[in-house]
Amino acid sequence: MAPSTFKLNTGQEIPALGFGTWQSPPGEVAKAVETALKSGYKLLDAAYCYANEDEVGQGLKAAFDAGVKREDLFVMTKLWNTYSTRAELGLDKSLRALGLDYVDLFLVHWPVGMNPDGNDDRFPKLPDGSRDMSWDHDHVATWTQMEALLATGKVRGIGVCNYSEPYLRQLLAKAKVVPAINQIENSPALPQQEVVDLCKEKGIHVVAYSPFGSTGGPLMSSEAVTKVAERKGVSPGTVLLSYHVARGSTVLAKSVTESRIKANLEIADLDADDLKILDDYSDSLVKEGKVQRYVYPPFGINFGFPDKLHGRTLPNGFKG
């Protein structure tokens, strides 16, 4: 039987399946969150960058009013780039919007900094339209601020998102606290095996986002996914969610449609043969240079991802 939770290096139990709130349409987020929590989701993923934490907070309140208990939920949100030098302020803004006293995990959203005094609170731009980046940003310094938050009682654990293998090695060489998780874009079309393997070696739990690839993309209808779906008698979407749980990772599902929210709760128990079919598909994409990364903001930075070796180098970043 597929596991329902995984133990983190903090001692916390994180659910194997979570509900994501990225790119959820304004006006629909609160109801979607309420529906998800009342339907049985225990893990909720949010972020200041998504500009919808107020609505997520409304959904949380409605679920609490309906009898869902805070202590039964695992809530995580993220520090955005414009707050990379002001971690506690970023946390406080998220807590206020969510209507919570603490989050179970607080995550560095990306290992970059953006101008905290720029022309926008989330996406400051230069006159030429490019992102107003802090080119002297040191992600290790941000992590030191994250570590200090553990003493405030406002976070139960800390982690990272979108960390490549070289960035993670740079961080671990200087961190006092090992990140609890690394939340990454992950699917059979973007296995990121070098990141997953390093995380497992260091006791860092992987949380996968965008498990379906892009909307209308080729992953859902790929031969490997449909073959496993037929073997198991489930939908391709169920296969793509179950793939991560079988690999020992948590996966985030996202929808604002009640029927889809409930359907995504189904996790099939994939066996070694099922995983081999999906892994062989992944291996072929890697070998042919055809992995598909859909989330890659135009920061202009080289993070050291094998499929994106371009951009500038930052302090304590990828040296090339």
Image (cartoon, rainbow, N blue to C red):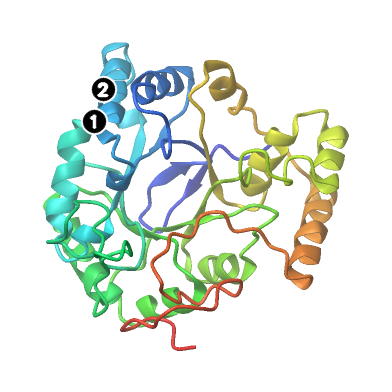
Q: Quadrant of residue 141?
A: bottom left
Q: Residue furthest bottom?
A: 319
Query: Mark 2: which amino acid?
Result: Gln
Q: Residues within 10 Å of mark 1 (few under 14, many from 20)?
A: some
Q: Residue at x 80, y 57 (%)?
A: 281
Q: Which mark is residue 54?
A: 1
**Left or right placement of residue 9 versus residue 120 in this view:** right
Number of numbered discs present?
A: 2
**Left or right placement of residue 148 versus residue 183 in this view:** left
Residue in front for this viewpoint, 260 or 149: 260
Q: Residue at x 68, y 46 (%)?
A: 243
Residue 137 visible in the current orientation: yes
Q: Where is residue 68? Give x, y as percent.
A: 34, 19
**Pointer 2 residue:** 58
Disc 1, SS: helix
Q: Where is residue 169? Give x, y as percent.
A: 44, 79
Q: Residue furthest top?
A: 66
Q: Where is residue 74? Give x, y as percent.
A: 36, 37
Query: Mark 1: which amino acid?
Result: Asp
Instruction: Tell me: residue 194, above or below residue 275.
Output: below
Residue 268 visible in the current orientation: no
Q: Quadrant of the N terminus?
A: top right
Instruction: Tell me: residue 121, above or below residue 112.
Output: above
1 and 2 marks in contact (CB < 8 Å): yes
Q: Residues within 10 Å of mark 2 (few under 14, many from 20)?
A: many
**Left or right placement of residue 139 versus residue 195 in this view:** left
Marks 1 and 2 sit apart, C-alpha to C-alpha, by: 6 Å
Disc 2, SS: helix
Q: Where is residue 307? Give x, y as percent.
A: 61, 71
